[in-house]
Image: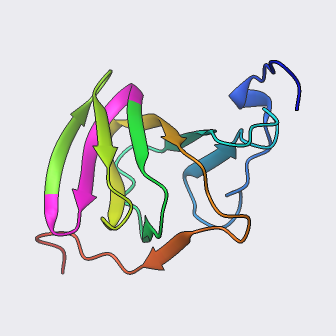
């Protein structure tokens, strides 16, 4: 492992491309040659409500809102998000995002994860959704 690494997240491939219309996901961990730290960029189109949710077996995450606004669903509770808010989420909490009218750009920061991964997909039911 090198002593340092630099990457522009906008130049990292969009790993979500084509799977969810209006969502970009750019994962920096491998590009940073990082053993213990994951840094990713997620960009949600205006008013996009995530159709999926996830939790983790081990990995705690923090999310930094760098542009726009929206909401995060944490189990069955929603929290409003605005630019420069930071929210930490314990591994077992199921989470999903919804962008506001100007979209939502977030940086996700995660700690070490097992080689086999530890993400757990979940269904999402937004309060008031039909």
The quarter of the rendered structure image containing the C terminus is bottom left
Q: Is residue 72 magenta?
A: yes
Lateral position of residue 110 relative to residue 122, left or right: right
Instruction: Give me the residue at 24% from left, 36% from top.
Output: 81
Give the color scheme: rainbow, by chain, secondary structure or one colour: rainbow
The picture places residue 60, in percent across and down from the top left corner, at: 42, 51
Kindly report the secondary structure that dominates the magenta region of the rendered protein.
strand
Q: Residue at x 65, y 42 (%)?
A: 36
Residue 43: x, y in percent? 53, 41
Identify which residue, 43 or 119, lies in the foreground.
119
Q: Nearer the viewer, residue 123 or 91?
A: 91
Residue 126 falls inside the magenta stretch: no
Quadrant in the picture for the N terminus: top right
Measuring 78% from the left and 24% from the top, which residue is drawn there? 7
From the viewer's side, name the closer residue of 29 and 67: 29
- Residue 67 falls left or right of residue 74: right
Q: Is residue 128 left or right of residue 1?
A: left
Q: Which stretch is magenta? A: 65-77
Instruction: Establish if 78 lies above or below 94.
Output: above
Question: Horizontally, is 89 left or right of 113 in the view?
Answer: left
Q: Give the farthest residue toward the right.
A: 2
Q: Residue at x 11, y 71 (%)?
A: 128
Residue 58 is situated, as x and y percent measured from the top left of the image, at: 48, 63
Residue 38: x %, y % from top left: 62, 41
Residue 70 figure quarter: top left
102 relative to 119, above or below: above
């Amino acid at each position: 492992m090198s002593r340092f690494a630099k990457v522009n997240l906008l130049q990292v491939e969009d790993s979500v491309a084509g799977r969810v219309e209006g969502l970009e996901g750019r994962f920096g961990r491998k590009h940073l040659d990082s053993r213990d730290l994951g840094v990713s960029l997620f960009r949600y189109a205006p008013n996009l409500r995530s159709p999926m949710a996830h939790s983790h077996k081990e990995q705690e995450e923090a999310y930094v809102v760098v542009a726009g606004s929206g909401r995060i669903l944490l189990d069955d509770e929603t929290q409003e998000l605005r630019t420069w808010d930071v929210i930490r989420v314990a591994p077992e909490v199921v989470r999903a995002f919804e962008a506001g009218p100007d979209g939502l750009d977030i940086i996700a920061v995660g700690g070490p994860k097992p080689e086999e991964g530890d993400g757990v997909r979940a269904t999402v039911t937004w309060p008031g959704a039909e």
